[in-house]
Amino acid sequence: MNTHVEKINLLSEMIAFSVVDGRLHEREYQFVWIVAQELGISRKEFKDLFHQELPTGVIKSEFERIQQFYRLALLMHVDGVLHQKEEEAIRQIAINMGLNPSATNRILKLMKASPNTMIPPEVLLDHFQEQHN
């Protein structure tokens, strides 16, 4: 993540996704705030993002797109309730990012089966990189 604008775009996308089920859960808010802190975004700027439209931007690197997909997938599970709208939205977001739909479906299934919804980074990358072979 190179620029401030890219960081803001990433957070804006996460915020938009967090309310796709019609409600912002406290755990979702806390998760996005943790990401914002890691990216060096101030509390004021973070709060302001909730009142802005979603900017359009393309994440260029495939690795960064995979990271963002995984962040959104974690966000989807953080409140302990998996909504149909969230599943549909994350699949559409992955397609819009240019990620392999088969790989995204496998990752989502692995996350559902995992006791804490987390999967090892090498498993995540392997599923997306197998399409390159």
Image (spheres, helix red, strand yellow):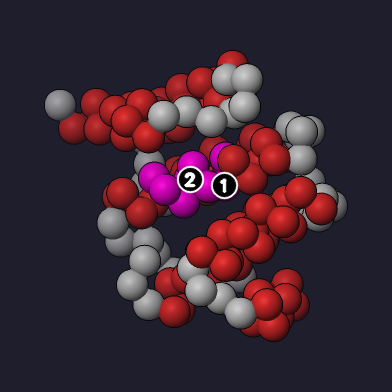
Q: Residue at x 59, y 16 (%)?
A: 113
Residue 112 at what x, y percent from top left? Answer: 61, 22
Q: Determine the secondary structure under disc 1.
A: helix
Residue 96 at what x, y percent from top left? Answer: 45, 50
Identify residue type, mark 2.
Phe
Location of mark 1 (residue): 72
Q: Are marks 2 and 1 in contact (CB under 8 Å)?
A: yes
Residue 21 among magenta residues: no
Residue 60 at what x, y percent from top left? Answer: 30, 61
Q: Is residue 46 left or right of residue 56?
A: right
Location of mark 2 (residue): 69
Q: Determine the secondary structure under disc 2.
A: helix
Circle 2 crowding by C-alpha within 10 Å: few under 14, some 14–19, many from 20: many
Can residue 59 be seen in the rendering of this structure?
A: yes
Identify residue type, mark 1.
Leu
Asked whether 97 or 125 is in front, the reply is: 125
Asked whether 33 or 126 is in front, the reply is: 33
Q: Residue at x 73, y 51 (%)?
A: 28
Residue 67 among magenta residues: yes
Query: What range is drawn magenta here?
Result: 66-73
Please name the predominant secondary structure of the magenta segment in the image: helix
Distance CA(mark 2)–CA(mark 1): 5 Å
How many marks are shown on the rendered structure? 2
The C terminus sits in image quarter: top left
Q: Residue at x 57, y 47 (%)?
A: 72
Q: Residue at x 68, y 77 (%)?
A: 43
